[in-house]
Amino acid sequence: MNEEEIIIRQAAADDALFIANVVAMAIADEEALHAYCGKDYISVLAEVASLESSQYSYRNALIAEVGGRLAGAVVGYDGATLHALRSNTLAVVEKRTGRMPSVVDETGEGEFYLDSLAVLPEFRGFGIGRRLLDAFCGKVFAEGHECVGLLVDYGNPKAEKLYSSLGFERVDTKPFFGHSMWHLQKRR
């Protein structure tokens, strides 16, 4: 596979199931996914991704394709909109599970938050994650935002190394899904 075969595009509503799978891969903690979305978390996340305004909305996602096959995605949003987006996300979760999970704020005003990034296993090692990150940051900065932020698990040094190679730096730690994570930012 060469770099020209990788296409990055804006997600569409019919990408919702793929986005749900990417979000689940990025969270990578089945216990947390069950606690947040219930046992049928993929279908709950797909419903959330199909909305025009939610944390995991297709409108907040970029998709990577290789040879017409879905290979990976990145999802992110303006931190100033977190509470509005989360209320729509949690409305679906509550409707589907009968409970309202409690979640700490992972971002806020002044930061465009990269919520989820994942590449399918068979497409890893070809630079797709890097291309998604470059496209995401390019889009965010072109829209006039000054800062991109994300959380990375302490136990994922490979991901942190990728983010650092693209200009992200540690700014602090944040609790998320019951454990501490590095909070990284990249400024324009």
Image (cartoon, rainbow, N blue to C red):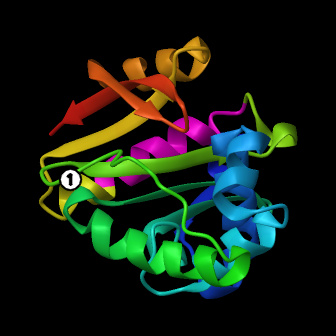
Between 138 and 36, which is closer to the camera in this rendering? 36
Q: Amino acid at mark 1?
A: Phe
| Residue occupying image coordinates x 83% and y 38% | 121
| Percent x, y of residue 8 | 56, 60
The front one of 119 and 113 is: 113
Q: Quadrant of the C terminus?
A: top left
The image shows residue 82, relative to residue 121, as above or below, that is: below
Confirm whether residue 72 shows in the render. no
- Residue drawn 20% across and 48% down? 111
Residue 33 in the image: above or below residue 129: below
> Is 40 situated left or right of 137 in this image?
right
Q: Secondary structure at mark 1?
A: helix
Tell me what residue is drawn at x 38 percent, y 38 percent.
150
Does residue 131 appear anywhere in the picture?
yes
The residue that disc 1 covers is: 141
Residue 179 in the image, given as x and y percentages of width and height: 52, 25
The residues colored magenta run: 126-138
Verify whether residue 92 appears in magenta: no
